[in-house]
Image (cartoon, grey):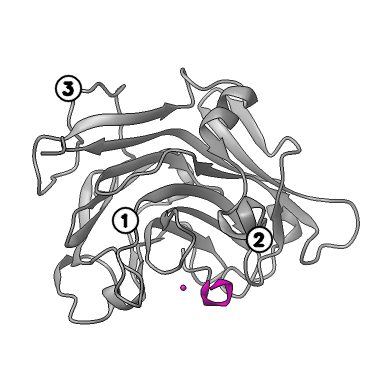
Amino acid sequence: MDRRSLLWLLGAGPALAAPTPPATADRPPRGPTRKSGYRLVKEWDFRRGIRTVEALRREFQTRYVWEQGKLDFVNDEWQRYRDRDNHAFRADGVALVARATPGELRPGSIESGMLRSRWTGRHGYFEIEMNVPRGRGLWSAFWLVAENGTWPPEIDVVEVVDNGRDDTRRSFHHLHGKAAQERARTHHSLLDSYGAFQPGLDLADGMHTYAVEWTADAVRHFVDHRLVADREYRWRHDDGRDAGDAHLLVNLAVGGRWPGPPAPEALPAELRIAAIRVWQTPTP
């Protein structure tokens, strides 16, 4: 997510989706991909595979990559990412838990959870199954960021914001940096002028699947295996340099300019994640 700008650091049908079956290396992604020959290269299954905090920490960090991996918020968000039971295991996966600390509800008084993958890579099909929370001031996101710490580029696989205007009945799918603005063609889009898709249901009512197919010259967004956007995009910094590998980020942010101040009744909140998967094609 662009965090409504990180520049200061250095920028489906109406029915609920059926649960995605366990992935195997021989099973391709379910979305209508442009490329063929994908093989599953990474799967984090939080229902059956990763079921302890120790296992989780072997695969993920819990802060942003910036400030030597210690940054726990950006811009004007109210939450701070912590490890005080902010990553809890439930029957349907792992929950990123946001809760208020005692005292006045204000910026810095909320603790929440984040997952940043230790695995890095580039190009492929990136998918998450998650159940977003509803409540004013909440901001759930799954995104790809350059591991080298220079921003942009950034691919927002999905953002769901509840601010009283935007809500859990729409999802946002943004691309960031000059590469998303300069001569970038859109081949297909179900998004409105704000980059939002309206699926005709409440995304907080259950697990949904969000994905991107990322190639050398385009990014295609999917919601519940339905193509919602196909746009040209090149993974590079604004000065033209190649941006290298990306890591995956999943977080539950709270407060700030876009989501607005959180409603007291919105907390505690949980972003539930069933699984994250990455498919890639073999390197020639």
Q: Secondary structure at mark 3?
A: loop
Q: Amino acid at mark 3?
A: Asp
Q: Amino acid at mark 1?
A: Pro
Q: Which residue is mark 1?
A: 199
Q: Which residue is mark 3?
A: 26
Q: Comparing marks 3 and 1, which lies closer to the viewer? A: 3
Residue span colored magenta:
6-11
**Sequence-first tag of 3 and 1:** 3
Q: Which residue is mark 2?
A: 73
Local crowd size for mark 2, using a 10 Å CA cut-off: few (<14), some (14–19), many (≥20)? some
Q: Is residue 272 magenta?
A: no
Residue drawn at 72 percent across, 39 percent down: 83
43 sits to left or right of 118: left
Q: Position of residue 122 (x, y in %)?
A: 29, 48
Query: Is 53 in front, or is 198?
Result: 53
* 120 relative to 48, above or below: below
* 26 relative to 163, above or below: above
Q: Position of residue 261 (x, y in %)?
A: 69, 69
Query: Is 63 in front, or is 206?
Result: 63
